[in-house]
Amino acid sequence: MASVFLWRLYSGYLYVTQRYPLCCMVEYFDVSSAGLSNGYPDNWLLRSLFSRMQRLSVECGGKNMMETLECVEIGPKDADYSVIWLHGLGANGHDFEPIVPELNIPAQKKVRFVLPHAPSIPVTINSGVVMPAWYDIASMNFLDQQDELGIRVSESLVKQLIDREVTRGVPTDHIFLVGFSQGGAIALHTGLRYPQPLAGILALSTYLPLDLTVNNERHEANQTTPIMMAHGTHDPVVPLRLGEMSRDYLQELGYQVNWRQYYMEHSVVPEEINDISDWFSARISG
């Protein structure tokens, strides 16, 4: 166990210094989950690596990617509900901005939409071109060579957004996590592990990442949280079968998944927007 963690830690250090040069690596690891005492390693080599990570933060002027993401916001400042909506690869928070009014959620429901911009990183499958992405993608086989560190970094960033909504007066069970494609993968990953109940998880044209870790890492707080997954029958990016496999696995774990599929490619269609609107309406009171 220690040797595996050591390798992941060292690999993570190398990964972050190359891919995220302006970050504090030590903030990316919940070391307590690795069985380490007092949240700090006893092994001298691990301590050395942690020290290098801490120095990295100082050398970078204290800048790090754990700062709250910039977001597009739509809705009242005194919201009763919040919807955190994550865009797909190469897009930004404005991508789903036009869809918000199409959901026809009455103003008196007091719903705030928070549409964050993903950090810009080199994406391997796109020849290393820097673009907004929630994690790196090595190939079109999304379950092969998964960017575990990048996924967990984005999980932490989304948790910060949830925490911020709580400080603004919205309880966690009034906060929805929504995402399309890459964003949907992060919504599922984060929502299943979040330690407090959420209002719902909406995953569009996506799949469940790091599926082999879900059973051990999921939190009972969101075992009964409403989950809706929607997918295109002709999706050339995230194959329908991959979405179905994710749905089936979640159902095996006891989650109630509302599955919808539409005659479309890797996109969103009016019928889907209507179903999303109904899904929100059924879960937003007031």
Image (cartoon, grey):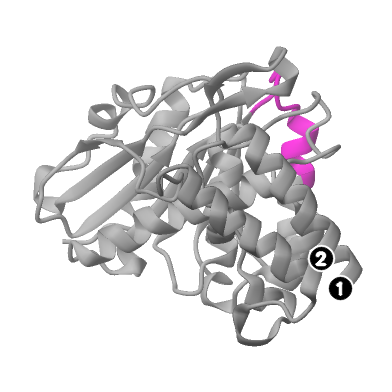
Q: Nearer the viewer, residue 150 or 199?
A: 150
In percent of the image, x 50 and y 51: which residue is there?
57
Q: Nearer the viewer, residue 145 or 121?
A: 121
x then y, percent, for residue 62: 41, 49
x then y, percent, for residue 71: 30, 37
Residue 68 higher or lower than 206, as above or below: below
Does the magenta segment cover residue 218? no
Residue type at the position of mark 1: Ala
Q: Is residue 209 visible?
A: no
Question: What is the crowding at mark 2: few (fewer than 14 residues within 10 Å), some, or many (at least 20)?
Answer: some
Q: Pointer 1: what residue?
A: 2
Q: CA distance from mark 2 to mark 1?
A: 5 Å
Q: Secondary structure at mark 2?
A: helix
What residue span does the magenta drawing correspond to? Answer: 232-245
Q: Which mark is residue 271?
A: none
x then y, percent, for residue 41: 71, 77
- Labels 2 & 1 near each other (Cβ < 8 A): yes
Residue 269 higher or lower than 158, as above or below: above
In percent of the image, x 10 and y 50: which residue is there?
77
Q: Quadrant of residue 126?
A: top right
Q: Which mark is residue 5?
A: 2
